Image (tube, rainbow, N blue to C red):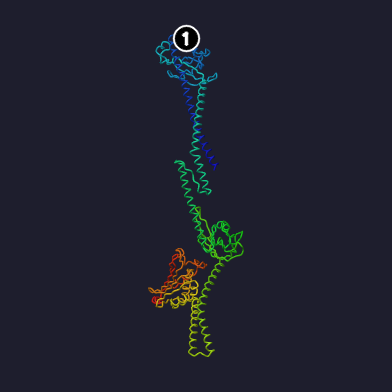
Amino acid sequence: MTTRVVQLSHRLLRGVLLAAGGASLLLGVVFLGLYRQQLENERAEASLQLNRMLQVTWENAMLKRDVEGLRDIVGKLGTLPGIRDVLILAPSGEVRFASDVAKLGRQMPGVAQATTAGKPLSRFENLESGGEVLRSINPVPNRAPCLPCHGTIAANPVNGVLVIDYDAAPIRDSARRSAILFLLAGSAVLGLTLATLWLALRHQVIRPLADLDAAARALATGDLSLRAVVTRNDEIGRVAESFNCMAGRLEAQMALVRAHEAWLQEILDALPDGVRVIRAADKKVVLANRAFCQQTGRPLEEILGHACHSSSHARAEPCVATLVICPLVELQEVGATLKASHHHQRAVGGQFPAEVNAVLVEIDRGGGGERYIVESVRDLGQAARVSHEQRLSELGLLAAGIAHEIHNPLGSVRLGVQGLAREIREARITPEQIQEYMGLIDQEIDNCIAVTRRLLLLARPPSNSLQLVVLGEALTDTLRLLEFDAQGRNIRQQIEVATTESRVLADEAEIRMIFLNLVQNAHHAMPEGGTLTARVSETEGQALIEIADTGIGMDPEHVARIFDPFFSRRADGVAGTGLGLTIVKNFVERMAGEIRVESAAGGGTRFLIRLPLAESSWENGA
């Protein structure tokens, strides 16, 4: 962070110095040139003034014919400080008067012809003898008083040329000193301006940008709570406010993403089968649920971010594609599915048979689609154990009910046989009494046969042929078989059947299996006891079967999934396969009927089944 701020400040400082220095230098050069030109023009103007004074003196002397006086004035002017020569030239360029007598008679035609009459000239010239002078040249025009000596103005427009040479060195030195003083003063002003500008930039720009950069870097490292300091209402202040707003929204979005991830993980953890998501590009597991961790015996940290073969097959290298049906190899098109059987390794050793259902999906991450394999892993051994345990439990309850139903008749038969044997042994029995005992024994044997008949009807495999099934009898038989279980759970069973026999065309084994599942579910829903009510009635050519309990009921989200395969939520805490109600729904729909459930948490549950009556089926040509 510090490095970037210093670089920015240096760049700004260099930029300001270069821009201001270049502009100042250019301005100084232009101004010095103008100043020097102005100074030289002022000195030239001064020389011209002196030349005009000499012109007046010369004209007066010529009119008075005072040649010696003019020569004396020229000599004295040549001795003044800063004046190197004073010359008076004839129109032809011959030197007639000179402060330096050595130059008398010298020809200087170029100087005489440099100007026209009445137009003086000043310029810097380099002398042949060395040095530089500021030469002031003033042609003296011919006038009326001069005509007697010089002739007509048309023939002789100029009477002579006055030339004064000033030493250029002092003029140049003066201009140079003035320029240096000006440059120093300008540099001081420029330095003060740059210092003020730099302090203002540092306070108004660099430091706020450094604070904003620190906040941005903290945001980039994951600290979403840091905010930029807003102390003013200018452009940088508004940028800081926008940054804070962006950071707040980003923090809210990240919280939403984390909540969504937690929600997704909770949903996955609620699934009974193991689930993991594998990134196809590098074979890394990016998502897994609790069931998969339990299946493999590994914590989530050892699964996420690691290769898929390390958590499922305990391999350091990828699985051999010719020995294992690998979804990463087999699935090539998005949406393609695969079902295969694997043997997964547990962390503590050993294997378990697994059924793997996989699908290839593609997710757009903003920079192009990325492919993932979603696997659902079912522990076949665990499923078999749960199914076997539940079946044994249900068979145990059913066997207890059957034993209870047969025990009482057998007890009565035994009492009758014992009484009959005792009476015969004592020779006190009459034929009428023998007939009475035998009738009692026969009746109880019929009761035992009825129990076994109901059991056989329930256990008989489904057949393709349909029978007339009396719903009231089938429901009554089912309640009798489960009466012993109901008494053990403190459940009171009651049945309400219409006077008419409601009959349907169906497989009797399936009808009895429907009733058995619904009644057992009602018992499971009342772990503290309650009342089970079973009703059979008719309405509009349909049989209406109702199984209601006063149990704990279900939440709406559970009601919506009650018929889903492998969904199980038993109130008694026993794990089920979640297939009972799925089978019931399939049986009912196969009979052209419908089933629905009504339930509320704490308000019990009621299953309603509608089946077409046999008479209606005949009328419709079934």
Occupied quadrant, residue 329: bottom right
Q: Quadrant of the C terminus?
A: bottom left
Percent coordinates x, y for residue 344 in the rendering: 58, 64
Residue drawn at x 49%, y 37% as measured from the top left: 201
Q: Nearer the viewer, residue 427 or 516?
A: 427
Examine the rendering and report whether any part of residue 237 can be seen. yes
On screen, 99 above or below 200?
A: above
Q: Amino acid at mark 1?
A: Gly
On screen, 179 above or below 395?
A: above
SS at circle 1 = helix
Q: Quadrant of the N terminus?
A: top right
On screen, 106 above or below 380?
A: above
On screen, 540 above or below 154?
A: below
Q: Nearer the viewer, residue 186 or 293?
A: 293
Q: Nearer the viewer, residue 37 or 406?
A: 406
Occupied quadrant, residue 294: bottom right
Residue drawn at x 50%, y 82% as measured from the top left: 412
Occupied quadrant, residue 536: bottom left
Q: How many labels were placed on the picture?
A: 1
Examine the rendering and report whether any part of residue 340 can be seen. no
CA neighbours of label 1 inside 10 A, class few (<14), some (14 to 19), many (20+):
some
Mark 1 lies on residue: 69
